């Protein structure tokens, strides 16, 4: 087979299509120009790719002859190299030994006549791509959508076909004289002038300007996008500035150049800016972060911008700063918006330009004065970095920089702080790289310029060492992985994007001074060459460090294990990598000198004999493909061991594909390790973009049960013995609560104890928006002595407790320990009171229709031990889910027209409920979907807090009279009494007020409402001259209504029950005291807080809190411990003013909605649930 046939076969296999003769000819022509120096005329010997020479050298070693001996016995090395260069980058070997290091070129001395690359004799510089400085260009383009408007063009015309046809039809013209109708074409609204600063500080931002121009030009928003340079002498030539409302200008500058400073250049530049500002919208795009703007020549402040019209010039803008203490606007200064190159900033600016007027837009504004501000007023002047020590520079940067910028600076200490390398490192280590973070590092003062292209920097003396200390030990020890990650970014973009900076290739195994390691295929794609290695890849054993090892550590030969998933083996035969802390350091040093493939493993000597403890860290997924998660987990493991007071001789670490196993000596004290794990996890794992689920297990035997992994990031399990030591220690007083893990035997002690990390925050007894549903179990809690818990309320509360060596047991208050000494115990509080919920669901039928079901569920705990053991959460959801599943299975056999039969079947065939220890009562009412839905009965109480909690926290309970204790007026009699009072008002109305049309009484809102109760009339005329007359009349009406007034159901029993529980009970009302005493005198109610009714001062009627405060005053009780039971909004407002909680009594839905809307703590339809809650106190 000839060389051409081999090339054709190779291309056919790569593209699944045979190449055409033209494609073959073009490929051969391009290969001749690129790689064959003998056929290319005028090319020097330096242009010969080094890869050909390397291939020739390899061929000479392999065959024993020269590559160009003319024998034709083998393929041409150049052809072989070109063939290898045609393969896909995905097929390149991933072995670290095959990766090539990249270095920045060293500037050559002036006398050197070379290419200035400073590389080896056989290396050729390459143009390496860099990641974009704008990571989200699509977001920037979307932010400019408000500007994507079209307007009629002033020049272009289009044929209006419809209008032309209409003219022809109306005029009936001959085809020879048809005249077309033209209409203006639609054109983009705005032109954009992109003015970019070319000052001495702007070369590092040239990629940002280039990318910003590309994003704006490709957005389709502007008619034209034209870049214009602005020179340091203050000139910006040929920038169009028509005052037509269709031109905007963006200035990209860091405001650090000489044209922003006082001087001839600054005056010229400011005159140009102010001229533009009077003719078109103008804004400055500042690449520096906002908190550094104060150090520039154009500081800005945040506030609100107001534009009177679309595309208004700066002279028509109004700015209001957020800070009321901001400095006043300088004289004759114009507001100029300052933006970051981010989507939110551009979106606000676009909304400001596109706004037709009237809207206020947030933004930052700098004042454009007639001349540049002096240096002392432009912002705070920082000290010269050259005069500060390295420690002060790093500390100042850490105090002022963002978190992302400080992390970037720390990783740059492992690389070269050049701007292209900074962009690569930033993309490799930060989740959301932004140019502002890059600017913080550049302007930190920690860098100094070095000879080379723009953006060449180096750290000041001592800064690199200090920044390295800010990195974790694992990060500092894995610099090769960072180089691979940076090189991976170059691998992805090689051959797809244009190179931006020069780099040189080093040896395949030389990473000193390198900023990245890339594949050989990437080097070929970039047009570079690879130096042949000076020695064979397999280095002899003598090349390893010769530092003597400690006496207790013997050197062990390393081996390679296949990269295969771990299989289950007995504990003694599990294929793990066992390493002590000292051996791990030596192994990593040896591995850094000679890269190998596979999983490294060593065989250290056994530390000791006997039973061993183990600490297992298992992630939910394989960490082989997630190096960042592996490094972070390794750091967390070492932090737990270090803080757990374990010496390196007490443990050994074994590496698993999904985590680590730490073997610990039997005599080691594990309680500090457990405390360190509780405090330190998840720790750094929570900062990962996708943190793995972690299971941490303390093992003291061959098998330790593991609970199911829940939603917690970390699940920590311990054996009963270790938990017993934890419960006896002071660490048990922290927020961590362990839960028992039981086996299948019902009376067996816990097999293990587990704790989710971080500690869960229990929501407590919170009610949902429809029903007052509480979790029946609270806990677990830890107590030193069960006798301190007291006696639980019979029938209402039960206490279930357990110890590390005993099963769950119901508390016996008389003999909690059965004669044994007290020990710490874990206990749960179980609510035995019934709970009620109503809901409406849909159930299928046998046909096309469906049933609408009104569900009423009532449940209570009848077996506390079984319920706690089941660890059931979300009882309401589980019961409703069972009802929906079982009910659907039943109703599918019934027609939608036979709702009664389906209802009987559902209520009788639901079966067993899926929650152990629970007694459930269910009532289902069915109706077809075409009929009115069945009524859903509202629960008795509706509140944000349970009634029992409201009463338990109250030391004083006050009752309103009309409603909570008695009902003086019905709706009819209340309206009649109100009309009686209004007749008195009409009789005594002044004639001049009647003739003038002035309404009687208080002209406020209360006086204009419809009076439905006599107290409303009295409040409206409280400050009127008729107030005393109306008060006397209402006193007589109330006294006459007392004999026929019914007492509120359960009101008398409720008052006595509250008094028996130790609460101070009283009455505070707007009804006259005489009527209250006459109504209650036959019941002899205990009212130690007294009766406080209406007196002569009508200004003290509710919502004035005077009567409530008088009821609390005798004992100086704090208002927060008081509770008012009332039924009107005026009483609720008075309670709020006095600081009391309010329990509303609503006899109809209208009153209930009004009280709930006003912020009532709880609303009940009757006093029955209040009485039940009071009896439970």
Image: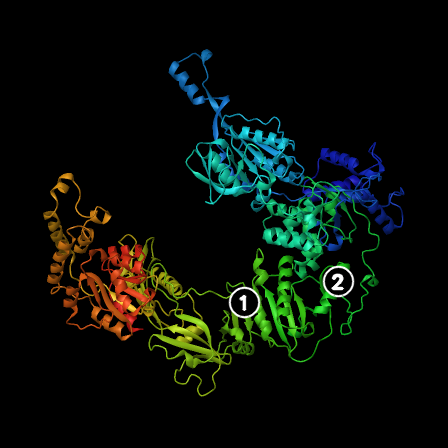
Instruction: Give the mark nearer the N terminus: 2 vs 1.
Output: 2
Where is the C terminus found, in terms of image quarters?
A: bottom left
Q: Secondary structure at mark 2?
A: helix
| Residue drawn 58% across the image and 69% down it | 677
- Are there few (<14), some (14-19), or many (20+) residues within 10 Å of tag 2? some
User: Is 300 placed left or right of 794 in the picture?
Assistant: right
853 relative to 177, above or below: below
User: Is 610 placed left or right of 591 in the picture?
Assistant: left
- Are there few (<14), some (14-19), or many (20+) residues within 10 Å of tag 1? many
324 relative to 574, above or below: above
Q: Give the label on residue 715, or none.
A: 1
Question: Residue 1134: x percent and y percent?
Answer: 27, 58
Q: Nearer the viewer, mark 2 or mark 1?
A: 2
Quadrant in which residue 781 is drawn: bottom left
Q: Of residues 550 and 284, which is closer to you in this image?
A: 284
Quadrant in which residue 165 is drawn: top left
Q: Of residues 153 and 262, which is closer to you in this image?
A: 262
Q: Which residue is mark 2?
A: 589
Q: Secondary structure at mark 1?
A: strand
**Residue 897 visible in the snapshot:** no
Question: Residue 150: x percent and y percent?
Answer: 48, 29
| Residue drawn 42% across the image and 81% down it | 787
Task: Give the CA separation, mark 2 to mark 1.
Answer: 34 Å
Q: Which residue occupies the extreme bottom position in the image?
A: 819
Question: Residue 122: x percent and y percent?
Answer: 83, 44
């Amino acid at each position: 087979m000839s060389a051409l046939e081999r090339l054709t076969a190779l291309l056919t296999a790569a593209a699944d299509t045979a190449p055409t003769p033209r494609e073959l000819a073009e490929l051969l022509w391009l290969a001749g120009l690129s790689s064959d120096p003998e056929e290319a005329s005028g090319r020097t010997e330096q242009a010969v790719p080094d890869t050909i020479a390397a291939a020739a050298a390899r061929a000479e070693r392999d065959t024993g002859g020269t590559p160009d001996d003319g024998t034709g016995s083998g393929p041409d090395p150049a052809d072989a190299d070109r063939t290898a260069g045609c393969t896909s980058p995905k097929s390149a070997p991933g072995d670290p030994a095959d990766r090539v290091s990249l270095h920045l070129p060293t500037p050559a001395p002036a006398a050197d006549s070379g290419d200035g690359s400073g590389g080896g004799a056989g290396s050729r510089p390459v143009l390496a791509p860099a990641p974009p400085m704008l990571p989200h260009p699509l977001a920037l383009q979307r932010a400019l959508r408000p500007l994507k408007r079209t307007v009629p063009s002033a020049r272009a015309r289009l044929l209006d076909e419809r209008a032309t046809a209409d003219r022809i039809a109306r005029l009936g013209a001959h085809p020879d004289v048809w005249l077309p109708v033209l209409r203006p074409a639609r054109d983009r609204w705005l032109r954009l002038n992109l003015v970019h600063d070319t000052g001495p500080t702007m070369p590092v931002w040239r990629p940002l300007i280039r990318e910003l121009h590309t994003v704006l030009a490709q957005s389709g928003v502007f008619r034209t996008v034209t870049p214009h340079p602005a020179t340091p002498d203050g000139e910006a030539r040929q920038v169009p500035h028509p005052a037509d409302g269709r031109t905007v200008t963006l200035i990209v500058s860091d405001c650090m150049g000489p044209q922003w400073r006082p001087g001839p250049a600054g005056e010229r530049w400011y005159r140009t800016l102010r001229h533009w500002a009077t003719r078109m919208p103008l804004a400055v795009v500042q690449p520096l972060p906002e908190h550094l703007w104060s150090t520039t020549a154009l500081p800005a402040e945040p506030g609100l911008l107001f534009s009177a019209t679309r595309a208004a010039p700066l002279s028509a803008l109004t700015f209001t700063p957020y800070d009321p203490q901001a400095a006043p606007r300088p004289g004759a200064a114009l507001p100029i918006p300052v933006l970051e190159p981010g989507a939110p900033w551009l979106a606000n600016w676009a909304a400001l330009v596109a706004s037709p007027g009237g809207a206020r837009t947030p933004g930052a504004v700098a004042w454009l004065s007639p001349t540049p501000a002096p240096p002392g007023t432009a912002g705070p002047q920082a000290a010269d970095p050259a005069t500060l020590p390295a420690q002060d520079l790093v500390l100042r940067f850490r105090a002022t920089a963002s978190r992302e910028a400080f992390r970037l600076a720390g990783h740059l200490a492992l690389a070269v702080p050049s701007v292209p390398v900074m962009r690569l490192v930033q993309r490799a280590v930060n989740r959301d790289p932004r140019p502002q973070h890059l600017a913080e590092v550049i302007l930190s003062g920690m860098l100094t310029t070095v000879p080379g292209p723009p953006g060449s920097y180096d750290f000041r003396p001592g800064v690199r060492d200090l920044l390295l200390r800010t990195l974790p030990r694992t990060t500092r020890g894995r610099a090769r992985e960072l180089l691979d990650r940076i090189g991976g970014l170059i691998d992805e973009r090689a051959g797809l994007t244009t190179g931006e900076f020069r780099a040189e290739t080093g040896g395949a195994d030389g990473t000193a001074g390198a900023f990245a390691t890339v594949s050989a295929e990437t080097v070929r794609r970039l047009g570079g060459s690879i130096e042949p290695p000076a020695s064979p890849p397999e280095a002899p054993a003598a090349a390893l460090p010769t530092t003597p090892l400690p006496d207790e550590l013997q050197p062990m030969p390393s081996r390679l294990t296949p990269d295969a998933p771990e299989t289950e083996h007995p504990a003694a035969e599990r294929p793990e990598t066992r390493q002590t802390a000292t051996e791990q350091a030596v192994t990593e040093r040896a591995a850094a000198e000679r890269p190998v493939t596979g999983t490294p493993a060593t065989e250290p000597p056994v530390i000791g004999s006997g039973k061993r403890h183990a600490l297992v860290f298992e992630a939910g997924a394989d960490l082989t493909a997630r190096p960042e998660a592996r490094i972070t987990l390794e750091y967390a493991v070492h932090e737990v061991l270090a803080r757990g007071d374990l010496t390196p001789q007490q443990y050994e670490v074994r590496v698993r594909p999904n985590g680590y196993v730490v073997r610990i000596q039997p005599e080691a004290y594990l309680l500090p390790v457990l405390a360190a794990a509780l405090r330190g996890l998840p720790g750094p794992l929570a900062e990962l973009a996708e943190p793995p689920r972690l299971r941490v297990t303390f093992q003291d035997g061959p098998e330790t049960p593991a609970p199911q992994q829940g939603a917690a990031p970390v699940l920590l399990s311990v054996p009963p013995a270790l938990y017993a030591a934890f419960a006896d220690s002071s660490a048990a007083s922290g927020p961590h609560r362990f839960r028992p893990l039981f086996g299948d035997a019902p009376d067996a002690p816990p097999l293990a104890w587990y704790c989710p990390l971080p500690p869960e925050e229990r929501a407590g007894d919170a009610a949902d928006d429809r029903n007052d549903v509480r979790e029946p179990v609270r806990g677990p809690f830890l107590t030193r002595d069960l006798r301190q818990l007291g006696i639980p309320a019979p029938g209402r509360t039960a206490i279930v407790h357990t110890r590390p060596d005993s099963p769950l047991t119901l508390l016996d208050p008389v003999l909690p320990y059965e004669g044994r000494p007290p020990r710490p115990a874990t206990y749960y509080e179980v609510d035995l009171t019934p709970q009620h919920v109503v809901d409406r669901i849909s159930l299928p039928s046998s046909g096309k229709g469906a049933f609408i079901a009104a569900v009423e569920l009532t449940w209570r705990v009848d077996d506390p031990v079984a319920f706690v053991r089941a660890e059931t959460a979300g009882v309401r959801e589980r019961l409703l889910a069972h009802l929906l599943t079982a009910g659907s299975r039943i109703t599918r056999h019934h027609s939608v027209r036979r709702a009664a039969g389906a209802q009987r079947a559902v209520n009788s065939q639901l079966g067993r409920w899926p929650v152990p220890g629970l007694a459930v009562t269910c009532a289902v009412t069915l109706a077809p979907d075409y009929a009115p839905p069945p009524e859903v009965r509202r629960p008795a109480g509706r509140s944000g807090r349970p009634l029992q909690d409201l009463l338990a926290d109250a030391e004083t309970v006050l009752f309103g009279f009309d409603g909570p204790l008695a009902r003086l007026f019905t709706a009819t009699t209340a309206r009649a009494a109100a009309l009686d009072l209004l007749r008195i008002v009409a009789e005594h109305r002044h004639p001049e007020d009647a003739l003038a049309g002035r309404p009687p009484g208080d002209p406020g809102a209360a006086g204009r409402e419809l009076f439905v109760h006599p107290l409303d009339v009295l409040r409206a005329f409280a400050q009127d001259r008729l107030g005393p007359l109306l008060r006397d009349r209402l006193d007589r009406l109330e006294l006459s209504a007392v004999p026929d007034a019914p007492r509120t159901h359960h009101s008398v029993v409720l008052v006595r029950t509250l008094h028996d529980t130790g609460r101070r009970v009283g009455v505070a009302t707007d009804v006259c005291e005489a009527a209250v005493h006459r109504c209650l005198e036959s019941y002899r109610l205990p009212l130690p807080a007294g009766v406080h009714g209406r007196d002569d001062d009508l200004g003290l009627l509710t919502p004035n809190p005077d009567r409530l405060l008088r009821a609390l005053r005798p004992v100086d009780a704090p208002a927060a411990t008081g509770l008012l039971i009332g039924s009107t909004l005026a009483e609720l407002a008075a309670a709020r003013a006095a600081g009391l909680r309010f329990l509303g009594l609503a006899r109809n839905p209208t009153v209930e909605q009004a009280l709930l809307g006003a912020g009532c703590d709880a609303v009940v339809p009757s006093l029955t649930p209040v009485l039940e809650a009071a009896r439970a106190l």
